[in-house]
Structures are given as structure tokens and as C-alpha cells.
Image (cartoon, rainbow, N blue to C red):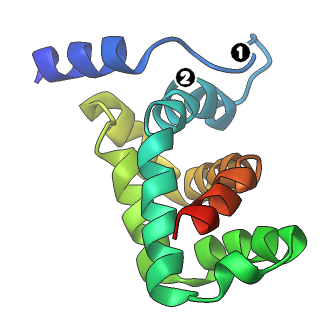
Amino acid sequence: MADRDTFLREFRGETLGTVSAQSSADELFQNQTIRPILKLQNDLFIAVFINYVNKNKADFYSYTVEKKLQVIENSIQKDIKFRNSLKGIVMALFTIEEYETYIQNSSSLNKRMMNLLIDRLKSQVQLFELESNSN
């Protein structure tokens, strides 16, 4: 297990965001674990979301940018199966220690995780417009 944990920490890279003595436990977990995983998995999240809209929102590419942003948010917040698959993509890169921390406060950490992912996808909405041009 230690080899896996060491590999994961090195593979994911450094802490992202600010960590200070005043940081809450959730904020530490977010910046030391969740943010590096989201950054590492970014291309996969883009591909997963493109697959999701191709299967579930056929007219997505004709939407305005504002409507696309709304669909990104609603898809992750309201489609429980989709949300759970996204959580699995993140959790697969937790160390055992991080998983043990996560299960202590999973509700709050899930909210942080999904909000960060929504923000990440929204900030890259232009990629979903490029996708429509290649269809």
C-alpha cells in the first residue's frame, strides 16, 4: 500500500491553492488532494463530459454559452449517476490515508469536489464549442 500511496502523491504533483495555519481540515484536503487530482484528470473529465452530452443532450452544441454553463452545472448537480462516476474518477486517485480522511466528512468534501469540477468545466466551455465544430 505504501508504494501505491507514494506513487499517487508523486504522480499528482504539488498542492494547489493556499494552505495556511488557519486552513480548515476540509480546505487542506481540497488543496492538497482534490485540486491536484482534478488538474491531473482534466482531459478525462472533458472527454467524459463530451460523452455525457453526446448521449444525453443531443442539442447541447446549439445552446448559447450561458445555457451550456447551466447544463454543466445541472448535469453534475442533478444527475446522480453521472455525479457518482465523476466522484469515482477522483476517488480512484486517493491514497488510503486520504480515503480515510474523506470518509470522515464525505458530504462536505463531495460538495467541494463537485463545485470545483463544475467551475473547472465551465472555465473550459470553449472546448465544448470546438467539439461542435468537429461533429
Q: Nearer the viewer, residue 16 or 133?
A: 133
Image quarter (top left, top right, bottom left or bottom right) of the N terminus = top left
Q: Is residue 127 left or right of residue 46?
A: right
Q: Is residue 45 left or right of residue 88?
A: right
Is there a contact, CB below 8 Å, between mark 2 and mark 1?
yes
User: Please, what secondary structure does the residue beneath circle 2 have?
Assistant: helix
From the top left corner, tell me how far across and down residue 81 is, in percent: 41, 80
List the residue tagged with mark 1: 19
User: Please, what secondary structure does the residue beneath circle 1 have?
Assistant: loop
From the top left corner, tell me how far across and down residue 36 is, in percent: 52, 27
List the residue tagged with mark 2: 32
Hey, which quadrant is residue 7 in on the image? Answer: top left
Q: Is residue 109 left or right of residue 80?
A: right
Above or below, 42 against 121 in this view is: above
Q: Callout 2, which amino acid? A: Gln
| Residue in the picture at 68% in, 32% down | 27
